[in-house]
Amino acid sequence: ATNCFKISDTTTIAILPPPNTQIYVLGSTVFCQGDSVVFSVNATSGNLYQWFLNGNVIAGANQPDLVAKVAGTYTVQVSNTQGCVAMSLATTISVNPPLVTSLITGPALVNPAIQYNYSVTNAVGSTYNWAATNGFVISGQGTNSIDVIWAAAASGILTVFENNATCTDSSSLAIQTTFGVDEVENRYFSIFPNPANESINLSFKQQTHPQLITLNLVDAHGKLVLSR
């Protein structure tokens, strides 16, 4: 008030950098129920970590890494040895319901070299990859319905893998080939020996089937080899 003045002593302040709270995401933030994603921050000696889900403390989640399985918004608070505390930006994950592939419909007891149709329930957005052990997918690969020709092996397996870009599932059907002597011998003709190596005999019972007979021979892929 009397226009007198005096300069105070100097006081120095230091601005300490906050701890690094960048979250690294190891995996996809959109996944199928039952899967997970890993969140990770830089691990520094002496730092303290606390993870939050939707703003609530996750009990026991006090490590630099977190395995997240529940949908929601995740953050992490990091405190360093200098007393600085920082909260990360939020990372959100979405969890889709599980994909359930239907049972495969189609015959399980089959004859070789004959075309059979198999299918599963079609789901919008799904793609289907089929695998036939001891069989050949003739058409329909990538769709929910296929045609298969089976080989003469005693058994086989048909499996479909369904994928909707997020979730996957599969379904299988055990196949039994019923091709045998009893099934290639009837009142019209018989085939022997069975199985055969280089040649087979076809014996036609003309007394019971006198009209013209057409013989079509196809390979295991369904290709016509011989017609007489």
Image (cartoon, helix red, strand yellow):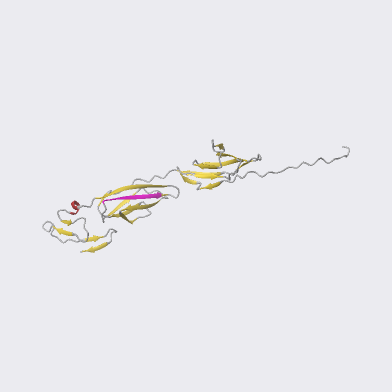
Quarter placement of the N terminus: top right
Can you name the residue that lies furthest to the top here? Answer: 59
User: Looking at the image, which residue is at 19% across and 53% down?
Assistant: 181
Magenta span has 224? no
Number of marks in the rendered image:
0
**Left or right for 169, reference 217:** right
Quarter placement of the C terminus: bottom left
- Residue 223 lies, with reference to residue 121, above or below; the image says below
Percent from the top left, x then y, of residue 123? 39, 48
The stretch of residues the image draws in magenta is: 154-162
User: Looking at the image, which residue is at 17% across and 59% down?
Assistant: 202
> Looking at the rendering, which quadrant does residue 32 occupy?
top left
Percent from the top left, x then y, of residue 3? 88, 39
**Left or right for 126, reference 5:** left
Q: Which of 43 and 162 is in front in this view?
A: 43
Residue 104 appears in view: no
Can you name the residue that lies furthest to the right here? Answer: 2
